[in-house]
Amino acid sequence: MGEPCILAIDQGTSSSRCVLFEADCRVVGSAQREFAQHYPASGWVEHDPEEIWSSVQSTLSDAVKLADDRSIAAIGITNQRETTLVWDRKTGACIHRAIVWQDRRTAETCESMRQDGHEALVTERTGLRLDPYFSATKIAWILDHVDGARARAEAGELAFGTVDTFLIWRLTGGAVHASDVSNASRTALFNIHTADWDDDLLALFNVPRSLMPDVRDCADDFGQATIDGKTVPIAGVAGDQQAALIGQAGLAPGVTKSTYGTGCFVLANTGSEARPSSNQLLTTIASRLDGQMAYGLEGSVFVAGSAIQWLRDEMKLIERAPDTEAIAEATGVVEDVYVVPAFAGLGAPYWDPHARGAVLGLSRGSGRDQVVTATLQAIAYQTCDLMNAMRDDGVEPSVIRVDGGMVANNWFLQFLSDVLDLPVERPVNVESTVLGAAFLAAYRVGLISSLDAVTKAWQLDRRFEPGMPANQRDALLSGWADAVGRVRASE
Ligand code: ADP
């Protein structure tokens, strides 16, 4: 057997990827498959579980081929969070399509629970909000809408899992029903203070405990997967944002990362303290290693890179996402036009599900270039709103580390640094998410002896320093606040 290596699976919202890493976390190669999104009704988003599984299987087997004579020492898994699957324990077949994190079908249920005064309990125990985003109401929806499901759940015949749990189940041939604390903390059923499923919340959301997986550390024993006839331990698991924070060497308190993919997710490590938010951010579990819990404060914006896709696919203003950089470079900062990409409502810190997008401040001279540039600016303004909320909650980062597909755009990162008035750091490896999963698995099987190795492996590609005059920044941000005020459906 040759050098040991690590396989990291990133089961994302639009594709599944599998990356093969050397023991020191250098990339050997990767494989990726996209899969279909299903929109059966307005605001509903589903994935076919068998398509998720087959895309993971085929990328795994492609990545294994890249190993040559290396031996695969462990598997790490990172995944789209909150997405909800329920399956039959005997057959392993899902009883409904996966209900994706973006799905809003339980908005009314959440609203009526909120009116009944239940949100305080949910927030106190889970750090989350009463929102369709999280798994709890999605599980109940499946139990209530699939014939006979509730009775089967009560009889212990069914299992619930977020995507990590579903993959662990399938990879171990049904031998292990487990999740990690970071994924569990996104269900709205997990008490983040006691680190256990919460009986009051299970009762409130009407979810039988028998459905729930065992919850483990992020670097732990998740059973043995069988790949190409060989058994490999599944040794690391974390939700995508938490894995990205780990990949950004964010195991230490104070590190803050912002990921720009389809959406934008800011996550700050707040250490052993679960810091409640007074600004509608989420308190969540960042990681648990060797039994040591690290909490995080998180804010998300639903639309980031997807606004660039909107410019390309719906507005047809650009041919390719990277075109936005040259356009913005040539146009310069746009001061009067504001794009508010609230296509699916507004996330933190507004949480307004009924808001919708708008382009404001057009004049006769405004054209494609202004709208494209203003769209990039909007993504930075939204990050700014999140960072202000974090500051109000007492988290004051001195630098922000960025990753995800959009951070290839230098103009965007300079503008981001300008409006945040903070340095922005882009690492050499912007694939922080899979890297985080690989680190966890490597740590568990002893390929790296300490997580300091993560800090050592983190390499700066470019640091963007703020340079915008304060009066210009203030004017832009007050124009943004005004634009957001105009699209909000509720205060
Ligand atoms: P995800 O993992 O959510 O699928 P990625 O991290 O792969 O997303 O990022 C892809 C997103 O980044 C797409 O929405 C794309 O529009 C956007 N994007 C990619 N390159 C650029 C660029 N140079 N400038 C602006 N946006 C970009």
Image (cartoon, rainbow, N blue to C red):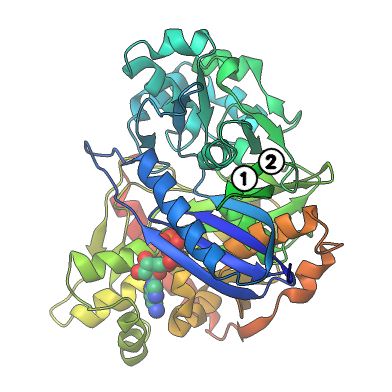
Give the number of the disc on residue 29: none
Q: Quadrant of ligand 1?
A: bottom left
Question: What residue do we see at 16% from left, 83% from top?
Answer: 365
**Residue 127 shows in the view:** no
Are discs 1 and 2 less than 8 Å apart at CB?
no
Say left or right for 187 vs 371. right
Give the number of the disc on residue 225: 1
Position in image of residue 222 (x %, y %): 69, 40
**Residue 204 shows in the view:** yes
Position in image of residue 337 (x %, y %): 28, 72
Q: Is residue 109 above or below residue 384?
A: above
Among all residues in the image, which is located at the extreme right? 449
Position in image of residue 33 (x %, y %): 38, 60
Going by the numbered disc 1, the residue's amino acid type is Ala
Q: Residues within 10 Å of mark 1 (few under 14, many from 20)?
A: many
Q: Is residue 288 above or below residue 15?
A: above
Q: Is residue 27 above or below residue 99?
A: below
Label 2: element kind: loop
Question: What residue do we see at 37% from left, 84% from top?
Answer: 325
Give the number of the disc on residue 222: 2
Q: Name the residue nearer the viewer: 12 or 369.
A: 12
